[in-house]
Amino acid sequence: MAGRKPGRNFLFVPGPTNVPDRILRAMHVTMEDHRSSDFPKLTLPLYEELKKIFKTKDGQVVIFPSSGTGAWEAAITNTRSPGDKVLIARFGQFSHLWGELARRHGLDVIVQEEEWGTGVSPERIEEALRTDKNHEIKGVLVVHNETATGVTSDVAAVRRALNAAKHPALLYVDGVSSIASIDFRMDDWGVDLAITGSQKGLMLPAGLGVLCASQKALAQMKDAKCTRAYFDLADHMRTNPSGYFPYTPALPLLYGLRESLVMLQEEGLDNVFARHRYLAEGTRAAVKAWGLKLCAKEPKWHSNTVSAIMVPQGFNGADVIDRAYRRYNLALGAGLSQMAGKLFRIGHLGDLNELMLLGGIAGAEMAMRDVGIEVVPGSGVAAAQEQFRAGQSTRETRMAAE
Protein backbone atom coordinates (compact mmCIF):
# COMPACT_ATOMS: atom_id res chain seq x y z
CA MET A 1 0.00 0.00 0.00
CA ALA A 2 1.36 3.41 -0.97
CA GLY A 3 2.15 5.70 1.93
CA ARG A 4 1.20 9.32 2.11
CA LYS A 5 3.39 11.95 0.47
CA PRO A 6 4.80 14.21 3.18
CA GLY A 7 5.07 17.94 2.66
CA ARG A 8 3.11 20.04 0.24
CA ASN A 9 2.51 19.20 -3.36
CA PHE A 10 4.63 21.41 -5.61
CA LEU A 11 2.12 22.60 -8.19
CA PHE A 12 3.88 23.73 -11.36
CA VAL A 13 1.33 23.01 -14.02
CA PRO A 14 0.26 26.15 -15.91
CA GLY A 15 -3.13 26.06 -14.20
CA PRO A 16 -4.66 25.48 -11.81
CA THR A 17 -2.11 27.56 -9.93
CA ASN A 18 -1.33 27.93 -6.25
CA VAL A 19 -4.18 29.45 -4.25
CA PRO A 20 -2.82 31.89 -1.63
CA ASP A 21 -3.82 31.36 1.98
CA ARG A 22 -5.53 34.75 2.00
CA ILE A 23 -7.84 33.62 -0.77
CA LEU A 24 -8.48 30.25 0.85
CA ARG A 25 -9.53 32.04 4.03
CA ALA A 26 -11.70 34.47 2.07
CA MET A 27 -13.55 31.55 0.45
CA HIS A 28 -14.20 29.88 3.80
CA VAL A 29 -17.67 31.36 4.16
CA THR A 30 -21.09 30.07 5.09
CA MET A 31 -23.65 29.91 2.32
CA GLU A 32 -26.03 32.83 2.00
CA ASP A 33 -29.06 33.98 0.07
CA HIS A 34 -27.83 35.23 -3.31
CA ARG A 35 -31.15 37.10 -3.70
CA SER A 36 -30.73 39.11 -0.50
CA SER A 37 -30.60 42.90 -0.46
CA ASP A 38 -26.99 42.74 0.81
CA PHE A 39 -25.64 40.52 -1.97
CA PRO A 40 -24.89 43.37 -4.44
CA LYS A 41 -22.34 44.75 -1.96
CA LEU A 42 -20.20 41.76 -2.90
CA THR A 43 -20.89 41.54 -6.61
CA LEU A 44 -21.10 45.07 -7.99
CA PRO A 45 -17.52 46.06 -7.07
CA LEU A 46 -16.21 42.89 -8.73
CA TYR A 47 -17.27 44.08 -12.17
CA GLU A 48 -15.53 47.43 -11.76
CA GLU A 49 -12.34 45.89 -10.40
CA LEU A 50 -12.24 43.30 -13.20
CA LYS A 51 -12.45 46.09 -15.76
CA LYS A 52 -9.14 47.33 -14.36
CA ILE A 53 -7.62 43.89 -14.92
CA PHE A 54 -8.82 43.85 -18.54
CA LYS A 55 -7.78 47.51 -18.86
CA THR A 56 -11.07 48.70 -20.26
CA LYS A 57 -13.37 51.62 -19.53
CA ASP A 58 -16.34 50.78 -21.74
CA GLY A 59 -16.17 46.99 -21.81
CA GLN A 60 -18.79 44.97 -19.95
CA VAL A 61 -17.69 42.14 -17.67
CA VAL A 62 -19.73 38.98 -17.12
CA ILE A 63 -18.84 36.23 -14.64
CA PHE A 64 -20.01 32.68 -15.37
CA PRO A 65 -19.89 29.67 -13.04
CA SER A 66 -17.72 27.74 -15.52
CA SER A 67 -14.20 27.20 -16.72
CA GLY A 68 -12.60 29.34 -19.42
CA THR A 69 -14.15 27.01 -21.98
CA GLY A 70 -17.58 28.29 -20.97
CA ALA A 71 -16.39 31.83 -21.63
CA TRP A 72 -15.14 30.68 -25.05
CA GLU A 73 -18.63 29.40 -25.80
CA ALA A 74 -20.30 32.56 -24.51
CA ALA A 75 -18.09 34.77 -26.68
CA ILE A 76 -18.98 32.79 -29.80
CA THR A 77 -22.68 32.04 -29.29
CA ASN A 78 -23.71 35.53 -28.19
CA THR A 79 -22.23 37.28 -31.21
CA ARG A 80 -22.33 34.79 -34.08
CA SER A 81 -24.80 32.80 -36.16
CA PRO A 82 -24.46 29.35 -37.73
CA GLY A 83 -22.69 29.67 -41.08
CA ASP A 84 -20.70 32.77 -40.07
CA LYS A 85 -17.07 32.64 -41.11
CA VAL A 86 -14.39 33.11 -38.47
CA LEU A 87 -10.63 33.04 -38.90
CA ILE A 88 -8.33 31.42 -36.33
CA ALA A 89 -4.59 30.85 -36.26
CA ARG A 90 -3.89 27.34 -34.97
CA PHE A 91 -0.53 26.75 -33.31
CA GLY A 92 -1.31 24.68 -30.22
CA GLN A 93 -3.88 22.56 -28.48
CA PHE A 94 -5.95 25.42 -27.11
CA SER A 95 -6.18 27.35 -30.37
CA HIS A 96 -7.24 24.02 -31.92
CA LEU A 97 -9.92 23.45 -29.28
CA TRP A 98 -11.39 26.95 -29.57
CA GLY A 99 -11.70 26.54 -33.32
CA GLU A 100 -13.38 23.15 -32.84
CA LEU A 101 -15.83 24.66 -30.36
CA ALA A 102 -16.80 27.28 -32.95
CA ARG A 103 -17.19 24.57 -35.60
CA ARG A 104 -19.49 22.54 -33.34
CA HIS A 105 -21.75 25.57 -33.06
CA GLY A 106 -22.11 25.62 -36.83
CA LEU A 107 -19.59 28.30 -37.71
CA ASP A 108 -17.47 28.11 -40.85
CA VAL A 109 -14.00 28.07 -39.30
CA ILE A 110 -11.10 29.12 -41.51
CA VAL A 111 -7.88 27.80 -40.00
CA GLN A 112 -4.48 29.35 -40.57
CA GLU A 113 -1.97 26.69 -39.65
CA GLU A 114 1.19 27.92 -37.95
CA GLU A 115 4.11 25.83 -36.76
CA TRP A 116 3.72 24.76 -33.14
CA GLY A 117 6.31 26.77 -31.25
CA THR A 118 5.35 29.94 -33.10
CA GLY A 119 2.28 32.13 -32.73
CA VAL A 120 -0.17 34.16 -34.73
CA SER A 121 1.07 35.82 -37.92
CA PRO A 122 -0.45 39.32 -38.22
CA GLU A 123 0.80 39.46 -41.80
CA ARG A 124 -1.18 36.36 -42.80
CA ILE A 125 -4.22 37.65 -40.90
CA GLU A 126 -4.06 40.93 -42.80
CA GLU A 127 -3.63 39.12 -46.13
CA ALA A 128 -6.70 36.95 -45.48
CA LEU A 129 -8.79 39.96 -44.49
CA ARG A 130 -7.72 42.01 -47.52
CA THR A 131 -8.87 39.23 -49.83
CA ASP A 132 -12.22 39.08 -48.02
CA LYS A 133 -13.71 41.89 -50.11
CA ASN A 134 -17.30 41.16 -49.05
CA HIS A 135 -16.43 41.04 -45.36
CA GLU A 136 -17.71 37.50 -44.96
CA ILE A 137 -15.26 36.86 -42.13
CA LYS A 138 -17.08 38.00 -38.99
CA GLY A 139 -14.44 37.31 -36.38
CA VAL A 140 -10.73 36.75 -35.85
CA LEU A 141 -9.91 34.38 -32.96
CA VAL A 142 -6.54 34.68 -31.24
CA VAL A 143 -5.09 32.76 -28.31
CA HIS A 144 -2.91 35.34 -26.59
CA ASN A 145 -0.84 32.80 -24.67
CA GLU A 146 -0.83 29.25 -26.02
CA THR A 147 -0.32 27.20 -22.88
CA ALA A 148 0.45 23.97 -24.73
CA THR A 149 3.63 25.33 -26.32
CA GLY A 150 4.64 28.26 -24.10
CA VAL A 151 4.06 30.86 -26.83
CA THR A 152 2.74 34.41 -26.48
CA SER A 153 1.40 36.24 -29.55
CA ASP A 154 1.22 39.96 -30.29
CA VAL A 155 -2.46 40.89 -29.99
CA ALA A 156 -1.80 44.57 -30.69
CA ALA A 157 -0.24 43.60 -34.02
CA VAL A 158 -3.35 41.60 -34.93
CA ARG A 159 -5.50 44.68 -34.27
CA ARG A 160 -3.18 46.71 -36.50
CA ALA A 161 -3.67 44.04 -39.18
CA LEU A 162 -7.47 44.38 -38.95
CA ASN A 163 -7.19 48.16 -39.14
CA ALA A 164 -4.78 48.05 -42.08
CA ALA A 165 -7.20 45.80 -43.96
CA LYS A 166 -10.08 48.12 -43.01
CA HIS A 167 -12.01 45.05 -41.94
CA PRO A 168 -14.96 45.15 -39.50
CA ALA A 169 -14.48 41.63 -38.05
CA LEU A 170 -14.61 41.33 -34.29
CA LEU A 171 -11.36 40.51 -32.50
CA TYR A 172 -11.81 37.62 -30.03
CA VAL A 173 -8.96 36.91 -27.61
CA ASP A 174 -8.38 33.97 -25.27
CA GLY A 175 -6.49 35.42 -22.31
CA VAL A 176 -6.93 32.45 -20.00
CA SER A 177 -3.21 32.07 -19.22
CA SER A 178 -2.23 35.69 -19.80
CA ILE A 179 -4.74 38.04 -18.18
CA ALA A 180 -3.56 39.12 -14.70
CA SER A 181 -0.10 37.69 -15.48
CA ILE A 182 1.01 39.23 -18.80
CA ASP A 183 0.16 42.76 -19.89
CA PHE A 184 -3.25 42.83 -21.56
CA ARG A 185 -4.89 46.02 -22.84
CA MET A 186 -8.40 45.50 -24.09
CA ASP A 187 -9.16 49.09 -25.07
CA ASP A 188 -5.72 50.03 -26.39
CA TRP A 189 -5.55 46.88 -28.51
CA GLY A 190 -9.12 47.14 -29.77
CA VAL A 191 -10.15 43.73 -28.46
CA ASP A 192 -13.89 43.08 -28.80
CA LEU A 193 -14.27 39.94 -26.70
CA ALA A 194 -11.71 38.78 -24.16
CA ILE A 195 -12.03 35.81 -21.86
CA THR A 196 -10.16 34.31 -18.94
CA GLY A 197 -10.61 31.71 -16.21
CA SER A 198 -10.23 31.90 -12.46
CA GLN A 199 -7.55 29.23 -12.02
CA LYS A 200 -4.57 31.02 -13.60
CA GLY A 201 -3.43 34.58 -12.90
CA LEU A 202 -6.45 35.26 -10.70
CA MET A 203 -5.08 32.62 -8.27
CA LEU A 204 -8.42 30.90 -7.61
CA PRO A 205 -9.66 27.35 -8.00
CA ALA A 206 -11.21 26.58 -11.36
CA GLY A 207 -14.89 27.46 -11.60
CA LEU A 208 -15.25 31.01 -12.90
CA GLY A 209 -15.23 31.95 -16.57
CA VAL A 210 -14.86 35.69 -17.07
CA LEU A 211 -15.81 37.46 -20.28
CA CYS A 212 -15.36 41.11 -21.19
CA ALA A 213 -17.22 42.47 -24.23
CA SER A 214 -16.79 45.74 -26.07
CA GLN A 215 -19.80 47.84 -26.95
CA LYS A 216 -19.27 46.88 -30.61
CA ALA A 217 -19.51 43.21 -29.66
CA LEU A 218 -22.59 43.73 -27.51
CA ALA A 219 -24.33 45.47 -30.41
CA GLN A 220 -24.05 42.25 -32.44
CA MET A 221 -25.98 40.21 -29.89
CA LYS A 222 -29.37 41.15 -31.33
CA ASP A 223 -28.57 39.49 -34.68
CA ALA A 224 -26.70 36.44 -33.32
CA LYS A 225 -28.60 33.22 -33.97
CA CYS A 226 -26.42 30.59 -32.27
CA THR A 227 -28.37 28.62 -29.69
CA ARG A 228 -27.60 29.62 -26.14
CA ALA A 229 -29.25 29.31 -22.76
CA TYR A 230 -26.91 28.98 -19.78
CA PHE A 231 -24.36 31.26 -21.45
CA ASP A 232 -26.83 33.86 -22.75
CA LEU A 233 -25.38 37.30 -22.05
CA ALA A 234 -28.83 38.87 -22.29
CA ASP A 235 -29.82 37.17 -19.04
CA HIS A 236 -26.81 38.71 -17.34
CA MET A 237 -27.48 42.11 -18.88
CA ARG A 238 -30.86 42.07 -17.16
CA THR A 239 -29.66 40.93 -13.74
CA ASN A 240 -26.03 42.00 -13.28
CA PRO A 241 -26.60 45.79 -13.14
CA SER A 242 -28.53 45.35 -9.89
CA GLY A 243 -25.90 42.96 -8.49
CA TYR A 244 -27.61 39.65 -9.13
CA PHE A 245 -27.16 36.61 -11.37
CA PRO A 246 -29.71 34.81 -13.57
CA TYR A 247 -28.95 31.59 -11.68
CA THR A 248 -27.09 30.47 -8.57
CA PRO A 249 -23.53 31.85 -8.63
CA ALA A 250 -20.41 30.18 -7.23
CA LEU A 251 -20.52 32.02 -3.90
CA PRO A 252 -17.19 31.03 -2.30
CA LEU A 253 -15.35 31.76 -5.55
CA LEU A 254 -16.83 35.26 -5.67
CA TYR A 255 -15.47 35.93 -2.19
CA GLY A 256 -12.13 34.54 -3.33
CA LEU A 257 -12.24 36.73 -6.42
CA ARG A 258 -12.77 39.80 -4.28
CA GLU A 259 -9.64 38.97 -2.28
CA SER A 260 -7.69 38.14 -5.44
CA LEU A 261 -8.46 41.52 -6.95
CA VAL A 262 -7.37 43.24 -3.74
CA MET A 263 -4.08 41.33 -3.79
CA LEU A 264 -3.41 42.19 -7.43
CA GLN A 265 -4.03 45.87 -6.79
CA GLU A 266 -1.84 45.80 -3.67
CA GLU A 267 1.07 44.45 -5.68
CA GLY A 268 0.26 46.65 -8.66
CA LEU A 269 -0.47 45.19 -12.07
CA ASP A 270 2.76 46.45 -13.62
CA ASN A 271 4.70 44.81 -10.78
CA VAL A 272 2.74 41.59 -11.31
CA PHE A 273 3.73 41.58 -14.98
CA ALA A 274 7.36 42.38 -14.12
CA ARG A 275 7.45 39.55 -11.56
CA HIS A 276 6.15 37.05 -14.10
CA ARG A 277 8.76 38.18 -16.63
CA TYR A 278 11.51 37.97 -14.00
CA LEU A 279 10.52 34.44 -12.94
CA ALA A 280 10.19 33.30 -16.55
CA GLU A 281 13.70 34.56 -17.32
CA GLY A 282 15.02 32.47 -14.43
CA THR A 283 13.28 29.40 -15.82
CA ARG A 284 14.64 30.02 -19.28
CA ALA A 285 18.16 30.36 -17.82
CA ALA A 286 17.70 26.94 -16.18
CA VAL A 287 16.63 25.37 -19.46
CA LYS A 288 19.68 26.78 -21.22
CA ALA A 289 21.96 25.47 -18.46
CA TRP A 290 20.45 22.01 -18.86
CA GLY A 291 21.39 22.10 -22.53
CA LEU A 292 17.74 21.79 -23.55
CA LYS A 293 15.49 23.89 -25.76
CA LEU A 294 12.09 25.45 -25.39
CA CYS A 295 9.23 24.60 -27.71
CA ALA A 296 8.99 28.33 -28.49
CA LYS A 297 11.12 28.76 -31.59
CA GLU A 298 12.36 32.30 -30.95
CA PRO A 299 12.64 34.70 -28.01
CA LYS A 300 9.82 36.83 -29.43
CA TRP A 301 7.46 33.92 -28.73
CA HIS A 302 8.61 33.28 -25.16
CA SER A 303 5.79 33.08 -22.64
CA ASN A 304 6.17 34.60 -19.19
CA THR A 305 3.62 32.22 -17.67
CA VAL A 306 4.73 28.78 -18.88
CA SER A 307 7.86 27.21 -20.33
CA ALA A 308 7.43 24.13 -22.54
CA ILE A 309 10.74 22.24 -22.39
CA MET A 310 11.67 19.77 -25.12
CA VAL A 311 13.19 16.49 -23.91
CA PRO A 312 16.10 14.95 -25.85
CA GLN A 313 15.36 12.48 -28.61
CA GLY A 314 14.81 9.01 -27.26
CA PHE A 315 13.19 10.20 -24.05
CA ASN A 316 9.55 10.66 -23.19
CA GLY A 317 8.41 13.80 -21.38
CA ALA A 318 5.63 11.77 -19.76
CA ASP A 319 8.29 9.75 -17.90
CA VAL A 320 9.78 12.93 -16.44
CA ILE A 321 6.32 14.08 -15.34
CA ASP A 322 5.43 10.74 -13.78
CA ARG A 323 8.75 10.49 -11.92
CA ALA A 324 8.44 14.06 -10.66
CA TYR A 325 4.98 13.38 -9.30
CA ARG A 326 5.52 9.95 -7.80
CA ARG A 327 8.96 10.52 -6.30
CA TYR A 328 9.07 14.25 -5.54
CA ASN A 329 5.40 15.25 -5.21
CA LEU A 330 5.93 17.75 -8.03
CA ALA A 331 3.25 18.38 -10.65
CA LEU A 332 4.56 19.37 -14.09
CA GLY A 333 2.51 20.02 -17.22
CA ALA A 334 2.30 17.40 -19.95
CA GLY A 335 2.80 17.71 -23.67
CA LEU A 336 -0.53 17.86 -25.48
CA SER A 337 -1.66 16.53 -28.87
CA GLN A 338 1.25 16.57 -31.34
CA MET A 339 3.59 17.57 -28.49
CA ALA A 340 2.62 14.56 -26.33
CA GLY A 341 5.77 12.90 -24.98
CA LYS A 342 8.04 15.49 -26.59
CA LEU A 343 8.10 17.97 -23.74
CA PHE A 344 7.13 18.81 -20.20
CA ARG A 345 5.94 22.16 -18.98
CA ILE A 346 6.80 24.30 -15.99
CA GLY A 347 4.07 26.77 -15.13
CA HIS A 348 5.37 29.95 -13.49
CA LEU A 349 2.29 32.09 -12.96
CA GLY A 350 0.00 33.20 -10.23
CA ASP A 351 1.08 33.35 -6.58
CA LEU A 352 4.76 32.52 -7.01
CA ASN A 353 8.19 33.74 -5.88
CA GLU A 354 11.82 32.80 -6.46
CA LEU A 355 12.15 30.15 -3.75
CA MET A 356 8.98 28.40 -4.83
CA LEU A 357 10.12 28.32 -8.44
CA LEU A 358 13.62 27.12 -7.51
CA GLY A 359 11.96 24.16 -5.81
CA GLY A 360 10.10 23.33 -9.01
CA ILE A 361 13.26 23.67 -11.10
CA ALA A 362 15.20 21.44 -8.69
CA GLY A 363 12.48 18.79 -8.79
CA ALA A 364 12.37 18.82 -12.58
CA GLU A 365 16.15 18.49 -12.65
CA MET A 366 16.11 15.47 -10.32
CA ALA A 367 13.28 13.80 -12.24
CA MET A 368 15.14 14.22 -15.53
CA ARG A 369 18.28 12.67 -14.05
CA ASP A 370 16.25 9.79 -12.64
CA VAL A 371 14.92 8.86 -16.09
CA GLY A 372 18.37 9.08 -17.67
CA ILE A 373 18.46 12.59 -19.13
CA GLU A 374 22.00 13.77 -18.54
CA VAL A 375 21.86 17.20 -16.99
CA VAL A 376 24.53 18.48 -14.62
CA PRO A 377 23.25 18.32 -11.03
CA GLY A 378 22.34 21.77 -9.76
CA SER A 379 22.99 23.44 -13.11
CA GLY A 380 19.46 24.67 -13.67
CA VAL A 381 19.02 25.85 -10.09
CA ALA A 382 22.32 27.73 -10.16
CA ALA A 383 21.55 29.38 -13.50
CA ALA A 384 18.12 30.47 -12.30
CA GLN A 385 19.64 31.90 -9.11
CA GLU A 386 22.15 33.92 -11.09
CA GLN A 387 19.43 35.19 -13.39
CA PHE A 388 17.35 36.21 -10.38
CA ARG A 389 20.33 38.04 -8.86
CA ALA A 390 20.89 39.90 -12.12
CA GLY A 391 17.24 40.83 -12.42
CA GLN A 392 16.60 41.60 -8.78
CA SER A 393 18.14 45.07 -8.68
CA THR A 394 16.21 46.12 -11.77
CA ARG A 395 12.93 45.00 -10.21
CA GLU A 396 13.67 46.65 -6.89
CA THR A 397 14.61 49.93 -8.56
CA ARG A 398 11.41 49.95 -10.59
CA MET A 399 9.19 49.08 -7.63
CA ALA A 400 10.83 51.77 -5.47
CA ALA A 401 10.17 54.34 -8.19
CA GLU A 402 6.52 53.42 -8.21
Image: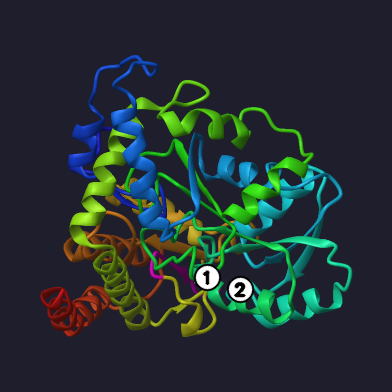
Q: Is residue 335 left or right of residue 389?
A: right
Q: Looking at numbered disc 1 in the image, what kind of residue is underneath it?
A: Trp
How much space separates mark 2 and mark 1, taking CA atoms?
6 Å
Position of 138 relative to 276 (above/below): above
Helix, strand or loop at mark 2: helix
What residue do we see at 75% from left, 70% from top?
112
- In primary-sequence order, the first of circles 2 and 1 is 2
Q: Nearer the viewer, residue 279 or 235?
A: 235
Q: Is residue 306 magenta?
A: yes
Answer above or below: position of 216 versus 114. Answer: above
Identity of the residue drawn at 58% across and 78% down? 157
Marks 2 and 1: CB-CB under 8 Å?
yes
Figure quadrant of residue 256: top left
- Residue sitting at x 83%, y 66%: 135
Give the magenta range: 304-314
Label 1: few (<14), some (14–19) or many (≥20) C-alpha neighbours in 10 Å: some
> Which quadrant would the C terminus be assigned to in this image?
bottom left
Which numbered disc covers residue 159?
2
Residue 385: x and y, percent? 18, 76
Q: Considering only vertical position in the picture, is 3 above or below 269?
A: above
Q: Is residue 21 magenta?
A: no
Residue on which disc 1 sits: 189
